[in-house]
Every structure is written in structure tokens, then in C-alpha cells.
Amino acid sequence: MTAGHTNRTRVSVDWDTKTIEGIKRGTADAKAGRVLPHEAAMAEIDAVVEAVEAEWAGKV
């Protein structure tokens, strides 16, 4: 096995581990009620996008 292969394997395992940890945190947040309904999250995202677009429009 080459050093490059070993490094790619380590990176892959690190990525998978972080992904699994994130899923576990998300599951715990959902069980504890620390989540936003989809509609509320999308409304926040839309508001940010609209604010940035308005800012950009003013600079053109």
C-alpha cells in the first residue's frame, strides 16, 4: 500500500466519522426539540438571499 493510498483512506475515514457525528448531533437535536420547521428555516434563508440581492442591486 502506498503512502498516498494510506492518506486517502485516513481522509475518507475522518470524513465518514465526522459525517456520522453530525448525524448523531442532528438526531439528538431533533429528539430534544432543538429544530426549526422546514418552512421557518426556508423563510430565514429566503430573507438572507433577498437582503443580499438587494445589497448587490444597490451596488451595480
Image (cartoon, grey):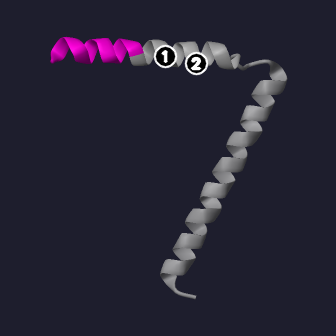
Secondary structure, mark 1, is helix
Q: What percent of the width, then of the height, locates residue 43?
A: 56, 13
**Could you tell me residue 44's position as x and y percent?**
53, 14
In the rendering, which numbered label is found on residue 30?
Answer: none
- Residue sitting at x 64%, y 49%: 18
Q: Which residue is mark 1?
A: 46
Question: Which residues lie in the magenta part?
Answer: 50-60
**Identity, as a three-letter code, of the amino acid under mark 1:** Asp
- Binning the other alpha carbons within 10 Å of mark 2 as few (below 14), some (14 to 19) or many (20 upward) gives few
The quarter in which the C terminus is drawn is top left
In the image, what residue occupies the spot 17% across and 16% down?
59
Residue 26 vertical position relative to residue 7 in the rendered view, above or below = above
Identity of the residue furthest to the right in this view = 31
Above or below — where is 53 with respect to 11?
Answer: above
Q: Tell me, yes or no, whether the two marked residues, 2 and 1, touch with CB atoms within 8 Å.
A: yes
What residue did someone put label 2 on?
A: 42
